[in-house]
Amino acid sequence: MHIETDATQHLQRAAKAGRDAARVLARSSAALRNAALAAMAGALRDHRDAIATANDADTAAFQGSNAFRDRLTLNPARIEAMAKGLEDVAALPDPLDRTLADWTRPNGLRIQRLATPIGVIGMIYESRPNVGADASALCLKSGNAVILRGGSDSANSAKAINIALQQGLESVGLPPACIQVAPNADRAYVAAMLAGAGLLDLIIPRGGKSLVERVQREARVPVLAHAEGLCHTYIHEAADPAMARAIVANAKMRRTGICGATETLLIDRTIAAAQLPRIVADLRALGCDFRADAQARMVVPDLPAATEADFDTEWLDSVLSIAVVDGIDHALAHIAKHGSEHTDAIVTADPEIAQQFLRGVDSAVALWNASTQFCDGAEFGFGAEIGIATGRIHARGPVGLEQLTTYRYTIVGTGQIRP
């Protein structure tokens, strides 16, 4: 109880400071927020040695898989990418300088719908420390304060990054409370955030299935949900074979630990015998393992057998589930049964089939002749992302600046009174 009380009291203080900071941000100019982002990028570069040392401590203590170790690791290129990401966000249009609608009523009242910040956002994430920098950049640019709670695996990295970001804020005169981190990775702090109605305006979970399910189950604050990335690539019989091989290899193996990585390959029965052995050979050369249904194992007999549960598994590792399907209807049915409505792709030269697929999958992102790993805020031109929303309210797909705003109305009259 003592830990929970401490967590609640800390959150109350942090949320109050964040609310005050959010009011400052909401009134700030785009030029000031952009200057802050530039200063934060510079501070990340100035602190890169301290960030690398903190990250070394995190990776030395880490005992998980190589794929998750990759998510945790910050090398010089990734630290520079974090800094560049802040500069990319600064270069984007101001999301608050938008009139979403403007109309005049018959009685002469002019009504405008205007973009406005959400307020104070709570971000709960796990092992990827760069998420904190991306979230901070997007929240700041969109006029929101943010309280970050990272996982225990990346605690040292998160604190080192936050020190740099707050230094950048202070250098341009913005409150450091615009960006805060939890004092520790204790689960009690998550509980305090989930119970933080009136303190936080929105919670964004970014992590594994168990984290997202807990947040959705327990939160007393609105949640922008990010479900697991159980992504599919479907090779239709009209696919160009070379294109299909290149896309599958990239979609699965470019980075296996990200939510946009393909976890299941679907391939039409009519082309399986000709193309599946080549695809498997390509992936094996890259270090991939497999779980395959009976039809796929008839084509490549040494593939390990898949269980039904394998097709419901987000591997986040060098493992690919494979199923042979009888055309697009069978492929869409498989995705509807096993997918998570995150990201799904088709490879085909038939535009009618492609449009049937794009309309038929109920995913946040659907692709035609492209890797599922393009489901990423930076690739969408958002500069960065705070997560991939798979819910049906407010936002879907990569969450960037626009998705971190809400709206309000202003009404201008000339003395009208209501009859």
Image (cartoon, rainbow, N blue to C red):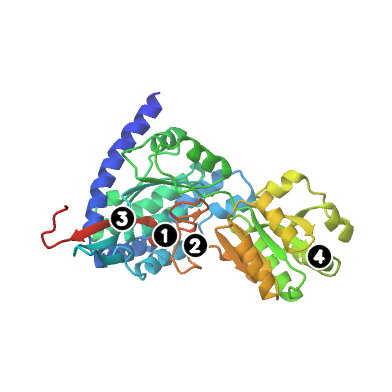
| Residue that carries the numbered disc 3 in the rendered image | 117
* Residue 344 tag number: none
Real-space Cα separation, disc 3 to disc 2, in angstroms: 29 Å
- Disc 1 marks a residue whose amino acid type is Arg
Q: Secondary structure at mark 4?
A: helix
Real-space Cα separation, disc 4 to disc 1, in angstroms: 45 Å
Real-space Cα separation, disc 1 to disc 2, in angstroms: 10 Å
Instruction: Give residue 7's quadrant in the image.
Output: top left
Q: Secondary structure at mark 1?
A: helix
Q: Secondary structure at mark 2?
A: helix
Callout 3: few (<14), some (14-19), or many (20+) C-alpha neighbours within 10 Å?
Answer: many
| Residue 139 image offset from top left, x and y in percent | 36, 56
* Residue 48 tag number: 1
* Residue 78 tag number: 2
- Disc 3 marks a residue whose amino acid type is Pro
Instruction: Give residue 86's quadrant in the image.
Output: bottom left
Q: Is residue 221 above or below residue 398?
A: above
Real-space Cα separation, disc 3 to disc 4, in angstroms: 49 Å
Real-space Cα separation, disc 4 to disc 2, in angstroms: 35 Å
Residue in the image at 51% along x and 60% along y: 75
